[in-house]
Image: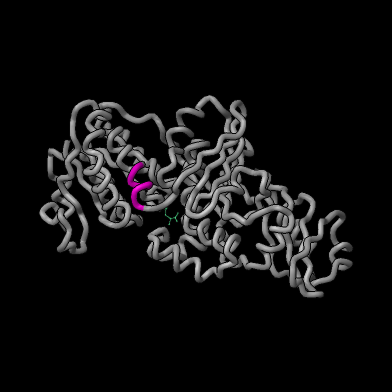
Amino acid sequence: MKVAVMGYGTVGSGVVEVIESHSNIIPKRIGGDTLEVAHILDLRDFPNDPHKDIFTKDFNDILNDPEVKIVAETMGGVNPAFDFTMKLLKAGKSVVTSNKELVAQKGLELLQAAEESGANYLIEASVGGGIPIIRPLTQCLAANNIEGIAGILNGTTNFILTMMIEKGMSFDEALKIAQEKGYAEKDPTADVEGHDACRKVCILASLAFGKHVYPSQVSAEGITNISLEDVSYINSVNGVIKLLGQIKYISDDKIAAFVSPAVVYNGSQLASVKDVFNAVLVRGDAVGDVCFYGAGAGKLPTASAVVADIIDCAKHTERKKIFGWGAGDEDYVVDYKSTIKMPFYVRANAGESEISAKFDDVKFLSRTGQPSNEVAFITDIMTENELTQRLEGVDVINTIKVTNY
Ligand code: HSE
């Protein structure tokens, strides 16, 4: 069976490698047929690559090849990936993707196009890299009302935070290593400012609750304000700082969804997720908490999920997949700052008496080298708006949410 790959970057080249290096097992998994990569679309030249005969810069070579029925889209970005994917799906070709930006922005339209033409649009690699999460969430947990989801959804930031926590490394040093290892997006802003995790939150929320959630509806805060001082205070209460995507069910018409740094106590499964690894914790009303863990970024782990989707398409050429979601609406995602209550970590230039006068119940923290005019504490539960009100007039250095996952 002929397939094509669009985008020969880290993931796309991994897809070709996994197809070729696993040619012994893939036919058994499909039920007889082999996979052959017939075209690789990329605008760049790869003169020393052994696949040079199958490179093309013309998308129509793939669209108009009647033998190609399955295409892996590993280009990233919304354009031209959206246009290409839409044309392929309308032509009845199945598309599998690792492109979370595209799914988060245009998933609804693409899934509808796939349904209309009878093709598959599969997205397992778009969240959590190699971690199986799309099928478990939509199939294995289908009997549950999902109460909430919390995920470490970005490998680059988890790697950076791990280096800060365990090696006392600076943010910049750790980011440089993450880029050298190929974890970071081309523009690391998407990783460190939480945009990449935000896209994955949108996909998980759309799948779990059935309405499209757009990145513009989800508040995203990154890790650039986290300092080694914060790491040290949190360590004193047996916690770590993680970049978490959180989704909470409120009613059938309302959810909360946000991405931010969060204090996670060491008893949580999420606290032990280190380096480039990701984890998604799903809270269902029948099953309780289930946690999916694995490599969330990188060439071969992400290719593992893409190729599994190709195998699924090859096996089920006639069957339409059963996951999907409906249209979203403007008021669907609530302002979490006025609705969701939680404790907060606060660091400020202030004295304990100033803080005690403003809060009924706080736990003060300490660290080695703490200046006499610096205070750090964990509050009782409250909304973020209430926290802001209470901190009026205080010279705040940083605040971080404390999670209950
Ligand atoms: N830059 C992303 C990450 C790649 O670090 O998680 C996988 O989506």
Q: Left or right? Give the position of 334 relative to 351.
A: left
Q: Residue at x 51, y 36 (%)?
A: 208
Q: Residue at x 25, y 27 (%)?
A: 318
**Closest to the observer: 398 or 294?**
294
Would you say the magenta stretch is mainly helix, strand or loop? Answer: helix
- Whether residue 354 is visible, yes or no, is yes
Q: Left or right? Give the position of 239 relative to 34.
A: right
Q: Residue at x 48, y 34 (%)?
A: 137
Q: Left or right? Give the position of 20 relative to 149.
A: left
Q: Residue at x 40, y 44 (%)?
A: 130
Q: Quadrant of the C terminus?
A: top right
Residue placed farthest to the front in the image? 167
Residue 215 lies, with reference to residue 163, above or below; the image says: above
Asked if residue 300 is among those painted magenta in the image, a careful observer would answer yes
Asked if residue 160 is among those painted magenta in the image, a careful observer would answer no
Percent of width and height locating residue 42: 21, 58
- Whether residue 385 is visible, yes or no, is no
Percent of width and height locating residue 166: 59, 60
Q: Quadrant of ligand 1?
A: bottom left
**Closest to the observer: 257 or 363?**
363
Percent of width and height locating residue 16: 24, 48
Q: Left or right? Give the position of 232 relative to 106.
A: right
Based on the displayed image, in which of its 4 quarters is residue 395 positioned?
bottom right
**Closest to the observer: 42 or 81?**
42
- The stretch in magenta equals 299-304
Q: Quadrant of the N terminus?
A: top left
